Amino acid sequence: DHNRALYRKRRDTLVSSFGRAGWDIPVPEASMFAWAPIPEQFAKLGSMEFAKRLLTEAHVAVAPGVGFGEEGEGFVRLALVENEQRLRQAAKGIKRMLAG
């Protein structure tokens, strides 16, 4: 129960704070991961290049979807392993990247 509540809170923080930053992420139902479609303005980069840009420009590490098979292209996978403060901090970096 404790772990479910913890991950639910992290999930809700990620979805809401990234959404306010300009990146809408579907709410994962029962996972410690969120599969996020690459924002439209970055879609042509593909998941590997987008993941690299997130790391270098927003300081956010994600797994490129293509690493999980051909159907993962166009997505990145985010792990809900960081606390809520770190997730909000990540959203700030993403907001700067999306605005730039």
Image (tube, helix red, strand yellow):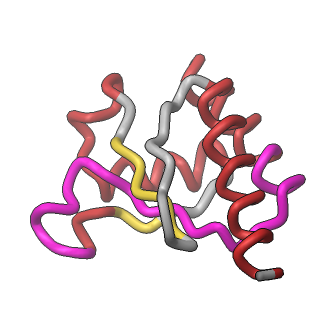
Above or below, 29 relative to 31: above
Rendered location of residue 35, percent (x, y): 40, 57
Please identify the residue farthest to the top as the structure is shown. Answer: 99
Is residue 81 located in the magenta-colored stretch of the structure? yes
Q: Which residues are magenta?
A: 68-88
Q: Is residue 61 left or right of residue 36?
A: right
Residue toward you, 11 or 77: 11
| Residue at 22%, 65% in the rendered image | 66
Farthest residue in the left direction?
70
Residue at the farthest right position = 85
Query: Residue 33, image x and y in percent?
Result: 51, 68
Which residue is at a point 34% across and 23% down the rendered structure image? 41
Query: How many marks can you see?
Result: 0
Q: Residue at x 83, y 65 (%)?
A: 83
Magenta-drawn stretch contains 13: no
Residue 49 placement (x, y as % from top left): 34, 51
Q: Quadrant of the C terminus?
A: top right
Q: Is residue 68 depicted above or below 94 in this figure?
A: below
Residue 76 occupies which quadrant of the picture? bottom left
Residue 56 vs residue 70, the one in the foreground: 70
For the N terminus, which image quadrant? bottom right
Q: Is residue 59 left or right of residue 30?
A: right
